[in-house]
Amino acid sequence: MGTTYLASGIVLATGIFWGIYWFPVRAIAELGLDGAWGTGAITLAAMLFLLPFVFARKGDLRDANLVGVAAIALGGAAFALYSIGFLYGKVALVVLLWFFSPVWSVLIAKYLLRCHVPKLRLVAIAVGLAGLFIMLGGDGELPVPGSFGEWMALTGGLIWALATAGMRLKSQVPPAPAAFLFALGATVTSFVFAPVLEPVPSIALSDLGAAAVHVFLTGGLWWGASIAALMWATVRLDPARVGILLMTEVIFGAVTAAIFAGESLSPSEMIGGTLVILCGLLEVWPTKTEIERLHV
């Protein structure tokens, strides 16, 4: 019971923590590491932070399933797109479009993995799609992302759904090495996008120290410690509890962006966003079959 409470607290704290992740990303961009350069620097710092733990358990990666390793790195790539998106779109919309990923997860399970999908999951798809159309097209516009940041979040959510499917099926990598692979995938992705999105950064000498502190703190805390802790906690909880607790990220992202960045959502964006959150809850809610399996 104590382990369950601890794991639940870690997942809840992770959701809150990532809800304010946009703040250091934008702060680092203002210091000169704009576009994908900032995310690349953050995730590279995370790799350096995690490297000693990887060396301490080299056998964990050497013996790991290659598909599982690739899935973890792909998850990091998805998170990199999410991180970069905060610089090119509204925080709340970027977070909400990322949390549209449950729809992708259900579609992948049904059509790619050929798994049986309960009716509740199909309802989740319908609710999620309705939310997406209202959120993006409720003001009479085409129901498609309106900014580059929103496209990055929607694409990242799709990639994340693919990655999590691979991780659930093939990955048995312990938390610290998994977090390292996660950061590696994000670093490679960020530096591929970096020269395309923004010119090579030029940081003033007076800002160099502040930029380095921001980068290493963000990389160590968000991409290092919190990801490793989340990977430890998620395997000790049922998926429904994890999904619900992580929804705090949406709330804290929207609230902090409204307070500190002056970003607000239109009525249609709020209604659509609520439906997207409901979609996520329905996707992780245990079905009758799953509940019966738990009691066997």
Image: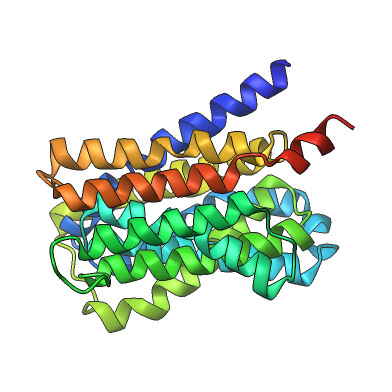
Q: Residue at x 14, y 50 (%)?
A: 266
Q: Quadrant of residue 41?
A: bottom left
Q: Residue at x 40, y 34 (%)?
A: 16
Q: Where is the C terminus found, in terms of image quarters?
A: top right
Q: Position of residue 139 (x, y in %)?
A: 13, 62
160 in relation to 251, above or below? below
Q: Position of residue 28 (x, y in %)?
A: 24, 54
227 in relation to 241, above or below? below
Q: How many marks?
A: 0
Q: Where is the N terminus found, in terms of image quarters?
A: top right
Q: Residue at x 63, y 20 (%)?
A: 5
What is the image's colouring? rainbow
23 in relation to 86, above or below? above
**209, 89: nearer the viewer:** 89
Q: Can see residue 209?
A: no
Q: Quadrant of residue 148?
A: bottom left
Q: Position of residue 45 (x, y in %)?
A: 45, 55
Q: Position of residue 84 (x, y in %)?
A: 32, 64
**273, 38: nearer the viewer:** 273
**148, 195: nearer the viewer:** 148
